[in-house]
Amino acid sequence: MDSFYLPDIFDGHYETSAAVLNGGIEVSSHILKPSFFETGLAAFYESAFKILESYKIKDIIDELDGVSRLFLDEKNASRKSAIEAISAVTGFSRESVALSIDLEFSSSLKPQMTAALKNEFGSVEILDDFVYDAGNDRYSRALPAGPVFAVSSSNIPALPHLSVMRAFLTKNPAVVKTSFAEPVFMPLYMRAFKDAGSLLAQCAAVVCYKSSGNIELTEKFIDSSNITIAYGGLDAEKYFAGRVRYPKKLIMHPHRLGFGLIGEGFTAGKSSSELYELAAAVARDVVTFDQRACLAPHVYFYCVKNNVPAEVFIKHIIAAFEAFEKEIPPAALSDTENYSRRNFIDSMNFEKGVRDIFETAGGKSAVIDIKPSKFPLSPLNRVLFLAGYEEPGEVAAILKTVKNYTQNAALCVLKDDEALWFDILSRLGVSRICRAGEMPAPTMLWRHDGIGALIEMTRFCDIEKY
């Protein structure tokens, strides 16, 4: 198994070595020669731009769709290899990895890609040639603004493919730096293009190295690109914001805080089975990716007015957690991680505002009933806060303190209250609002972190008054 993928044009510009990842997974690694940056990278970009320019966008979509469908095929060897390797390296259960792959690629099919391009550009053809706008009597064309350097994370299995897909959809070549904590998926993804005989296999490269101690490599990749896509925490956000300077573009997807909200009267009058259905949706938001994604909720705010008592609803969540522990087993944690998680839960017994703590029989999932004074931060790995409130202003005041870090919100309120909450959440930094149970499954139409990521990877030329 490889931890890198380099198109044929890089032959002679690197050497291979062996490495052992977490879980005992043996992989081949690369050592980049000086010539990689001196001549290899420029030659790759030049060749890849020519290949991508030769494609019609509809043909790029078709080839991306074909590879997505391969990874959705449960019998596909690359999918099977990815599930086994990612599970061993990251600790995610096989069931969790399989679910993540399904979620990622079911939203990366031809209809979704086409809709995303139309959503941001108005048409698909604008990426091939000038398109006439009859209403304004002008022509416009979107051209690639790359090349692209993309830095991946490891918290969502299969997510890194999105950077390559976005690059290809805007006819940009890309170099992807995988996370050293999970370097196996992207080489498998790119290898699928090569095995299919697609020329797109020559338009993206995958490199793998530890960021710490190899900052000079990251600097060289940034300097050689026009667009940097990066996922990461606050330190990464600070670094890239200071390093990627105009006229280069930075598309940053830093760590953000997900949450849900159940409004006044939403659970009133619901039967036990209806309450369980809602609780299962809440639990699904938590267990998918084991809460490690920014999409997942740290907390569900729960209105205590005109609803069933919080402890009644929590018992339904715990029952749903029990079921999910069998369907999608929790990630395997190290002794240190287990101790840290256990210590956090136990310490909540002494935290101001905590009313009670509920856990599944095996202690693998927990709900903490709290009256919060600030945004409750979960230790992740299936620990959810249920935060009681009475008035919308209480929630708004808490969210205001973290408005620069909010992102994905599940909303369950009565129809008459929707407009109020849509306005509150949109003004407090939220870039996606969905129903409970849908937090892990955004569509490609979502403007991730509030930006049009596809349109950010292009530049425009307009013909007017001609």
Image (cartoon, grey):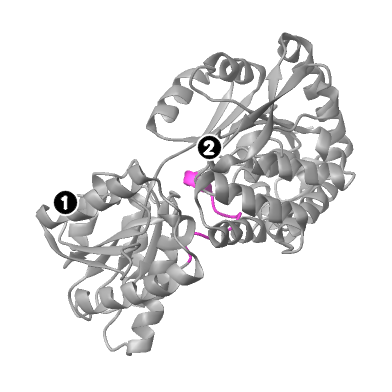
Q: Is residue 333 left or right of residue 109?
A: left
Question: Label 1, label 2: how many angstroms apart (C-alpha)?
Answer: 29 Å
**Secondary element at tag 1:** helix
Quarter holding the N terminus is: top right
Residue 343: x %, y % from top left: 22, 49
Q: From where the camera sits, is residue 332 visible? A: yes
Q: The disc labelled 2 sits on which kind of residue?
A: Ala
In the picture, measured across the screen, residue 185 lies left or right of residue 322, that is right
Helix or strand or loop: what does disc 2 sit on? loop
Rendered-image quadrant of the C terminus: top right
Residue 439 located within the stretch drawn in magenta: yes
Q: Which residues are magenta?
A: 438-450
Q: Residue 249, relative to residue 220: is it above or below?
A: below
Q: Is residue 391 magenta?
A: no
Label 2, on which residue? 181
Residue at point 70%, 17% (across, down): 32
The residue at 69%/19% (across/down) is 31
Residue 428 x/y as whole percent: 32, 49
Q: Which mark is residue 347?
A: 1
Vertical position of residue 42 compared to residue 55: above or below? above
User: Considering depth in this image, is 65 or 283 the residue closer to the camera?
Assistant: 283
In this view, 238 is above or below 453: above
Amino acid type of the residue that numbered disc 1 sits on in the rendered structure: Ser
Q: Closer to the camera, 38 or 24?
A: 24
